[in-house]
Amino acid sequence: MKIFKFGGASVKDAESVKNVSMVLKSQGFDKCLLVISAMGKTTNELEKVVELYFKKEDYQTEIEKIKQKHIEIAKGLFQNSHVVFDEINLFFDDIVSFLRRNKSPNYNFVYDQVVSCGEMISTKIVSEYLNDIEFTNQWLDARDYIKTDDSYRDGVVNWQKTEEFISTLNSICYVTQGFIGSDDNNFTVTLGREGSDYSAAIFAYCLNADAMTIWKDVPGVMTGDPRKFKDVSLLSNISYEEAIEMAYYGASIIHPKTLQPLQQKNIPFYVKSFVDPTKDGTKVGASDKNQHEESYILKENQTLLKISTRDFSFIAEDHMSLVFGYLSKYKIKVSLMQNSAISLALCLEDKFLKIDELNEELQKVFKTDVVKNVSLFTVRNAKMENIGKFYQEKSVLLEQIAKNTLQMVTQ
Ligand code: ASP
Ligand code: MG
């Protein structure tokens, strides 16, 4: 079994969906499972619906816009009389009626029930289209297979149940959603933004797949995001460890949770271009040709938090334990930390916008300083003899060098 993941950019319009079938043709469409994201920027648009809903503003117009976008895409793929148009209409009616009836004040819960619809509708469209052109496939509701706890927007996979359900699938072709699973009450739970790669890896792991490929609008994993850095080149072979580190430091090409399941079962993983599907792209896996090229990763929207004791005493274990307790409570992730005798500096990723609440709690005990909107710049496999150039034209608030990795928090 092969696992293919197609992200939002690869299904952003009718032409792109047609291109998916070209990719499949080039690879052979048998015994494969396709994991597909929401079309284009649909996830962001649905996030806006949830925001408007909670602000008690007009969310219906926004839903209508998203619906029209999908109808337009479908018009480019199907005859006017196709059942898919009824499905699209029903689908968006369901979102409206869910929101109208909803009583839950839990933002993250409502978010997951609404935002997941992007994947539900995109997979319906792609599955129907592929069936029409005789790429016969079965549409699956990923929520019947990927089981999680009820951490809405950040679902934790229940591997035992998930493996049990996924292993019932037999070797034909399937089309399913990325990004979503469900909890014990069958409510939808999302796996975190850009989580479709992770979904694909979950299926790959549970099916003991022969290989997994994610299809991107770039040639593969590069030494830096070509939209942010000049003079980057393609990495044709990297190890799981290198890829895990790159994802951990914020290389957005691969979702950080994706690699471990693949590495555990030694499943070869490819990142390839959907524009040029016959090109090799990047192979991630065990190989003796692994590259260790200098690579650059920029993680934006970070927060720098500096903590010191009020009486200038040393930052000790009990202080640390208190701070980390709060971080875990507010689900704030640490991207970088550095401690000295009297202060602790943390570069944080505050996905749920809880930094002010955290700061308030910390201020009861510590002196704190918060700088929002900083970036974390990481150079992997840095050539130490010429790192000077990375400091030019930057206001560096914190830096750290460990092994061959240079990291700096900049404003
Ligand atoms: N559609 C979701 C997102 O944009 C999941 C994904 O694309 O991986 O975050
Ligand atoms: Mg996406």
Image (tube, rainbow, N blue to C red):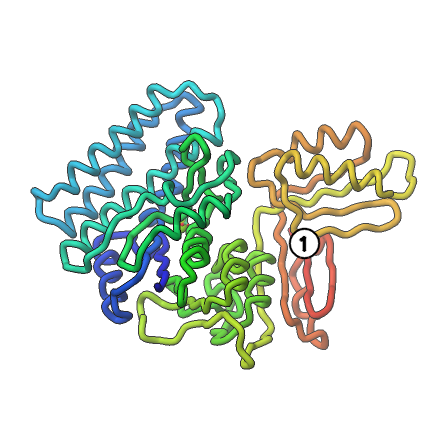
Give 139 or 307, whichever is nearer the viewer.
139
Which quadrant: the N terminus?
Answer: bottom left
Q: How would you rate the neighbour count of disc 1 (Cα within 10 Å): few for under 14, some for 14-19, many for 20 or more? A: many
Residue drawn at the location 51% of the way across and 43% of the way down: 158
Is the residue 7 above or below the residue 383 in the image? Answer: above
Is the residue 73 above or below the residue 283 in the image? Answer: above
Picture coordinates of residue 216 (x, y %)?
38, 62
Quadrant of the rendered structure where residue 173 is?
bottom left
Residue drawn at the location 45% of the way across and 35% of the way down: 183
Helix, strand or loop status at disc 1: strand
Is the residue 315 above or below the residue 28 in the image? Answer: above
Q: What residue type is labelled 1?
A: Val
Picture coordinates of residue 234 (x, y %)?
47, 74
Residue drawn at the location 44% of the way across and 37% of the way down: 189
Picture coordinates of residue 224 (x, y %)?
52, 66
> How many discs mark residues in the rendered view?
1
Residue 83 located left or right of residue 160: left
Residue drawn at the location 26% of the way across and 69% of the way down: 28
Q: Residue furthest bottom?
A: 289
The residue at which mark 1 appears reads as 409
Give 189 or 405, whichever is nearer the viewer.
189
Quadrant of the rendered structure where residue 97 is?
top left
Residue 365 located left or right of residue 122: right
